[in-house]
Amino acid sequence: MAETNNNPGGQTLNERLRRAAEMARRQSGEPQETEGPAGGSAGGRTSQTSQTSQTGQTGPTSPTAPVNPPMPPTPPKAAESAAPREPRRPRPVEEYYTEPPRKPQKKSKTALWLGILLGLAVVALAFLFVNNSRQQAEHEEQLQQLQLANEQLQLANEYESLNNEFAQYENQTSLLANDSIVQKYSAARAQVEKLLQELKNEKNKSAAQISKLKGEIATLKGILRTYVEQIDSLSKQNQALMSENKDIKQQNQQLAQTVQSVQANNKVLNERMTLAEKLNVTGVTLTPLNKKGKTEKNVTKARQLMVTFTIPQNNSTPVGEKTIYCRITNPEGELLGNGGSFSFEGGNVACTARKSVEYAGEEIGGIKIYWDVNATLTPGEYTVELFADNYRLASRRFTLKK
């Protein structure tokens, strides 16, 4: 029985089934079957039998390519002839044909990547814009700070120049009857110095403080201008008075020179008289003594210090009792002993020991003054001074050894 041709293209149902089976086998990797000479239903059964024998099993086939179910056993020929065979119903092509998976469209991926790149570009541009704006703001801030620092330096130099100009006239403030202008200048100068110090200590300069400093310096200029004008006016007035008094000063100077000359002559005469009346001493010595009253070479073992001297003859010296005051100073500069004090050049001076002698204008030799040692003496340089009648008669130094 011939199969009905339902394909308007001219292909029969069996041909379409075979094509679908071949496509399924190609996808599953199975070998193609050989068509029978009849090209009918027998060929389809041979293909199924061959497929079953090749796989070797009746279980489920690969999920990618469906396998035709086994055909029922062929009845004997007697049965065929006895009962007519009903035509076999064709299976739907969908059982033998599996649509391959669709590949993702390249166009959609390209659009996605373009969108991502566009977003990144927008972010990068925004970052560059913000960074550039920040750098520009920082640059403008630095430029402004440099300008303010330059103005501060110029104002400081201007202030220094004003101070130098004021110093030229500062010694003439005594010419002013009212020194309030000097007080105003000092107050303004203190304010300027305060502002300069504040600007120096601040890292970021303030335009308001610079402006305030300009105003204070302008005030300082005005005060100095008024100060200089008054000084110049007073100087001109005083110049006339000075020229009038010049002659009088010259006369006074001549008189003063004459008086000085007379006073100098009188002073020389008085000094000569005083020196002539002064009591003199000679032969001053300092000797350490031991406990037996004999000379001791080792000063640390001394029990007494003896000062000896001579008063020579002097007819100009007033006669009478003379008190000689002795001062002995150790190497450390300390005064030895506690012999009281005496008047000298308007003050009181402490002494080590004293001795009174009767002077009749003749020489007195071998005068001795003793001082008892009350502590261990140290070797070194000792100083001996003798005073009388408000005069220092002698000052000698002696080295005492150990």
Image (cartoon, grey):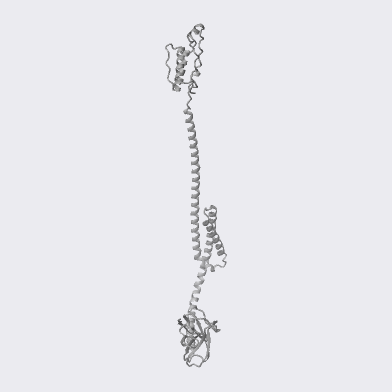
| Image coordinates for residue 122, horizontal then vertical, percent | 49, 37
| Image coordinates for residue 190, horizontal then vertical, percent | 55, 61
* Residue at position x 49%, y 76% in the image: 249
- Viewer-closest of 348 and 267: 348
- Viewer-closest of 292 and 138: 292
| Image coordinates for residue 318, horizontal then vertical, percent | 51, 91
Q: Does residue 190 show up?
A: yes
- Viewer-closest of 169 and 105: 105
Q: Does residue 280 show up?
A: no
- Viewer-closest of 111 and 159: 111
Residue 354 sits above or below residue 89 on the image:
below
Disc tally is: 0
| Image coordinates for residue 310, horizontal then vertical, percent | 47, 89
Residue 374 sits above or below residue 124 on the image:
below
